[in-house]
Structures are given as structure tokens and as C-alpha cells.
Image: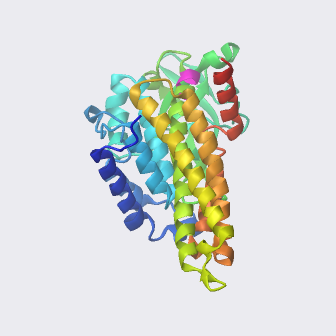
């Protein structure tokens, strides 16, 4: 078992750390306050190759491994989870789905600009009545011969108004249930496609989250991904990789909060010495560091299994379940260590605490992860 990162991975990790400190940190509190999408920062992430990290160079990607991607997600999330979720969705869901299952035409037209960071993608699965139960798709795609007619609503879509390319899951034949579901590529600007108001959220407030409405949207036949009825399997396979990205995001949020808490505890004095030297605080820091390291091992292992071409279903769900719990536990303690200062925005930890919660919900709730884990271990 090797726990050392390669020289290339260390360089990528450092590049992400520098970007987070120099580009994301300035203005992050203001962006959160005003729900401002980090457009300028995302553009720079694309220029650095961080929006198509695991895509082959043939399609304008960086051709890197999943572990490198996880390292980047961790570093960016220490500072700004609203920016890192853009990286996660574009890499794990949109680019991965298109490269793994798209046609040559789809890869050429859609994957290349997405991997190059010239365009941003969105993954559209959740609906008002279909969250954890993804089989209950109410959005329909009626086969009209040379095109499909798309009707319905999608909820909680990351990159909702800033994306150019949308992967939309819809029901084509309800009698076939999940085997009648398809996945389609929809472009911004298609007639009948509208974007709803931005959601006013607890955390990741800079992230661009919207509902999407489709009213008789004509989607060309060549924009269906895979064979007829492949949509549900496409969504589930894609989400398996997405869980690793969100697990890395949760890990980064926890690590970022811990680093701030440690630094504060070494500087803040009470009863004549730094509070880090008081056992009550020192033990909190010990617990936080241990939880983060355990989460890191789970996340890195899941990414490593993906890189080896082995099954990572169980490892990915375990990583997401545990890392998201650690994110909540550690950020709450980070606020506690800061005391009253932790309750105000300028010290960052209250934002990290708010951002942590979503990691237990999107890309499959913690309850869904337990269903996946139990199914895998019982099998």
C-alpha cells in the first residue's frame, strides 16, 4: 500500500491550493452574501484545465487521474464550495457521462468545449416529485421520429442559468418504468426551454441553482445518449463518480474549517495561554484531525479504485456518507472553537458550516448512501 502522491499530483495539488488562496478567497464572503456566481474564477479554472481534468486530451481534456481531481476538489473546497461544485458537476457528471457514453458526434460537438472550459454543463435529474426516487421521472420525452418533444420541470439544478449544455433525464415510455427512461443533451436557447428564478439557499450561495422548465422542446434524435431506455442506467453510473467528487468537496470543507480553527486556537489566548493548550480545545482539535484523516483515506481510496478500473460503488458511497458527516461535525466544532467570532462572517467558519450541510443531501442523500452500502455488503 502506497500513501505517497506522485510529483505530478503534488504539483496539481499545490496549483489548486494557490488558486484557492489567491483567486477564490478574495471576495468569497461578498459572493456568498450576495449570491454571486464566481464567473471570473470559473473562467480561470477552465483555462487551468480544471473543468475537464479526467477527459482525454483527444477531447481537449487534461487526461489526469481521478485522484488528481479529488486533490483539486479538496483544495478548492477549503475556500469556496460554490466554485468547487461547478468543477464537480462539469467533471464528474457532464464530461464523464459524455466521454463514457456519448457518440462521436456528441463528443465532438459538446464534450470538447466543456472539457476545455469554454462552456459549462449541467446535470438535470431531480424533479419536484423525483428526488431520491429517481425512477419517478415526470419529465417526458415523446418520440416524434426524427426528434423528441420534451416537457416537464427539473429542480435544484447546479449551473442552472450559466450552463450552455444540459444533460436531461426524461421518461419516454412510462409502461417500461425505469427501462423507459432516456438521457438527452439540451442546449441553452432551444425554443420552449426556460430557466426559473435562482434559489435562495442556506449554503453554497454563490452556486447557480435554478429550476428548469421544458415546454415542447424539440430535441434532435442524435442528442439522445446511448440506446433507447439507457437513461436511468446512465444517470446511476454517472452519479457513482459524482459521489467521489462531492465526498472530496465535503473533505475540503472539513479540512478548511479545521485549519482555520487550529490557527485561531494557537493565536487566541484565555487564562494566560493559547486556547489550543487548554485540554477542552486540544481534544476537539485531536478529534477533528482524526476524523478528517479517516475521511481522506476513504475518499482517496474511492478515487484510486476508479483509476484502477475496479468497482468503486461501495467505496464511493462510504466516502460520501462519512466525509459529509465529518464536514458537518468539524465545521460545527470550528465555530465553537472560534466562540463569538465564529458566529460572524469575516472569520469564514460560519459559511463553511452552512456549506457543509448540502454535502449530506445532493448527489444522493446520506440515507440513499446507506441503502447503497447495505445492498453492496449484503450482496
Write the residue at 60% across / 67% down.
349
Residue 272 lies in the magenta-colored region: no
User: Quick check: 275 above or below 233?
Assistant: below
Residue 144 pos. (x, y %): 54, 18
| 308 left or right, relative to 196 | left
> In which image quadrant can residue 134 be found?
top right
Which segment is the magenta one? Answer: 231-235
Residue 234 lies in the magenta-colored region: yes
User: Quick check: 371 above or below 26?
Assistant: above
Write the residue at 57% across / 37% down.
124
Residue 178 pos. (x, y %): 65, 19
Taking the view exactly as shown, the residue that stands out farthest to the left is: 58
Write the residue at 30% across / 33% down.
56
Taking the view exactly as shown, the residue that stands out farthest to the top is: 176
> In which image quadrant can residue 194 be found?
top right
User: Quick check: 156 above or below 215?
Assistant: below
Amino acid at each position: 500500500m502506497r500513501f505517497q502522491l506522485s510529483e505530478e499530483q503534488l504539483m496539481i495539488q499545490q496549483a489548486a491550493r494557490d488558486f484557492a488562496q489567491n483567486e477564490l478567497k478574495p471576495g468569497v464572503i461578498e459572493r456568498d452574501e450576495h449570491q454571486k456566481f464566481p464567473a471570473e474564477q470559473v473562467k480561470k479554472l477552465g483555462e487551468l484545465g480544471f473543468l475537464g481534468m479526467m477527459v482525454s486530451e483527444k477531447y481537449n481534456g487534461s487526461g489526469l487521474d481521478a485522484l488528481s481531481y479529488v486533490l483539486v476538489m479538496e483544495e478548492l473546497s477549503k475556500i469556496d464550495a460554490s466554485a468547487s461544485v461547478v468543477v464537480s458537476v462539469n467533471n464528474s457528471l457532464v464530461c464523464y457521462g459524455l466521454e463514457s457514453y456519448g457518440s462521436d458526434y456528441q463528443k465532438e460537438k459538446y464534450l470538447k468545449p466543456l472539457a476545455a472550459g469554454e462552456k459549462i454543463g449541467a446535470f438535470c435529474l431531480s424533479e419536484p416529485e423525483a428526488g431520491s426516487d429517481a425512477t419517478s421521472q415526470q419529465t417526458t420525452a415523446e418520440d416524434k421520429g426524427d426528434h423528441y418533444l420534451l416537457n416537464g420541470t427539473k429542480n435544484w439544478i447546479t449551473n442552472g442559468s450559466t450552463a450552455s449544455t444540459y444533460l436531461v433525464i426524461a421518461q419516454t415510455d412510462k409502461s417500461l418504468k425505469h427501462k423507459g427512461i432516456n438521457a438527452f443533451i439540451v442546449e441553452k436557447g432551444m425554443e420552449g426551454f426556460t430557466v426559473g428564478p435562482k434559489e435562495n439557499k442556506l449554503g453554497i450561495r454563490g452556486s447557480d441553482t435554478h429550476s428548469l422548465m421544458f415546454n415542447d422542446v424539440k430535441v434532435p434524435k442524435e442528442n439522445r445518449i446511448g440506446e433507447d431506455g439507457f437513461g436511468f442506467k446512465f444517470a446511476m453510473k454517472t452519479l457513482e463518480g459524482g459521489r467521489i467528487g462531492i465526498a472530496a468537496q465535503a473533505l475540503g470543507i472539513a479540512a478548511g474549517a479545521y485549519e482555520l480553527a487550529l490557527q485561531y486556537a494557537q493565536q487566541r489566548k484565555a487564562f494566560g495561554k493559547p486556547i489550543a493548550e487548554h485540554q477542552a480545545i486540544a481534544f476537539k482539535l485531536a478529534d477533528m484531525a482524526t476524523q478528517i484523516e479517516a475521511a481522506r483515506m476513504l475518499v482517496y481510496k474511492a478515487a484510486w479504485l476508479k483509476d484502477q478500473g475496479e468497482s468503486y460503488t461501495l467505496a464511493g458511497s462510504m466516502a460520501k456518507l462519512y466525509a459529509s458527516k465529518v464536514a458537518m461535525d468539524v465545521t460545527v466544532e470550528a465555530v465553537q472553537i472560534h466562540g463569538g467570532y465564529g458566529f460572524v462572517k469575516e472569520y469564514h467558519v460560519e459559511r463553511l458550516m452552512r456549506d457543509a450541510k448540502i454535502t449530506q443531501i445532493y448527489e444522493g442523500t446520506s440515507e440513499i448512501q446507506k441503502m447503497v452500502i447495505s445492498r453492496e455488503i449484503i450482496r
